[in-house]
Amino acid sequence: MQYDKTLVLIAALFAGEVSAHGLWTEERRGNIEVVYGHGAEDNAFKAQKIRGAWAYDVAGKMIPVSVERLADHARLEPLKSPAVMAVALNNGMWSQTADKKWVNEGRSKVPGAVGATETFKYSLAIYQPGAKLPKLDQIKLLILPEVDPLTIGPGKSLPVRVLLDGKPAAGVKLIGDYRSAPNTLSTETDKDGRAQVLVRNEGLNVIAAQVEVPVKDSVDVDSRGLFSSLTFLGEPHHE
């Protein structure tokens, strides 16, 4: 079974504050920091919303990783230098009132709510060339590179496949440079969930996707809002 364009919806209702923010990781001062923001914005967030972090070596073997929950963000601390890192954040349920305000509760607790969604943010970072990617079932919206992204180089196209709940997702719009141009769409996945995304930067590349998936038979939400990023350096780092 595949998800097609009738199921993968970019819902205009949730194009505002709740779904606008993305998630990715950056190396800062020798640490792997979780970034929650929109483009150049780097916003404070509640670190307890991080629901999981997973690190792997080049062979795809899991490395123990702890999450340091700081006052305004989170830092990931793998036991040794990882080749691959994934992180998940649950931003909770949000309901919109008739006057366009958002409340961090499900519909059943917000009288007169006109819509409600539960938002999840995911990130996959690839740090070392030749890394074998493990199964990443915990990443419900996944931008999966089909070749090693560290071998592509700026100005060339990276083939990717987008998976939603483990299945190929058609019609998903991809942002090729979320950090610098978060509102500029690069391409869209085909019927098999595949697309070619231009590698734009010598430094950090953040490729992103965002979808809204309808939820049936819930008293609290109409949809799941999912954001996902794939990050990697366009060229090897030199001292």
Image: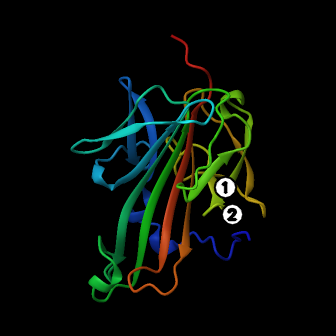
Please state which of residues 109 and 139 is positioned toward the viewer in this rendering.
139
Residue 94 picture location, percent across and down: 35, 72
- Which of the marked residues, 2 or 1, is nearer the chain's N terminus? 1
- In this view, the residue farthest toward the left is 71
- Residue drawn at the location 56% of the way across and 72% of the way down: 213
- Report the side of 237 relative to 68 (left or right): right
- Residue drawn at the location 71% of the way across and 71% of the way down: 4
Determine crowd level at label 2: few under 14, some 14-19, many 20+ residues with C-alpha closer than 10 A.
Answer: many
Q: Are marks 2 and 1 in contact (CB under 8 Å)?
A: yes
Residue 43 picture location, percent across and down: 32, 47
Quadrant position of residue 77: top left
Quadrant position of residue 150: top right
Name the residue beneath numbered marker 1: 162
Q: Is residue 16 above or below residue 45?
A: below
- Report the side of 239 relative to 201 (left or right): left
- In this view, the residue farthest toward the top is 239
Mark 1 element type = strand
Amino acid type at image mark 1: Val
- Report the side of 171 relative to 175 (left or right): right
Query: How far apart are the alpha carbons under marks 2 and 1?
Result: 6 Å
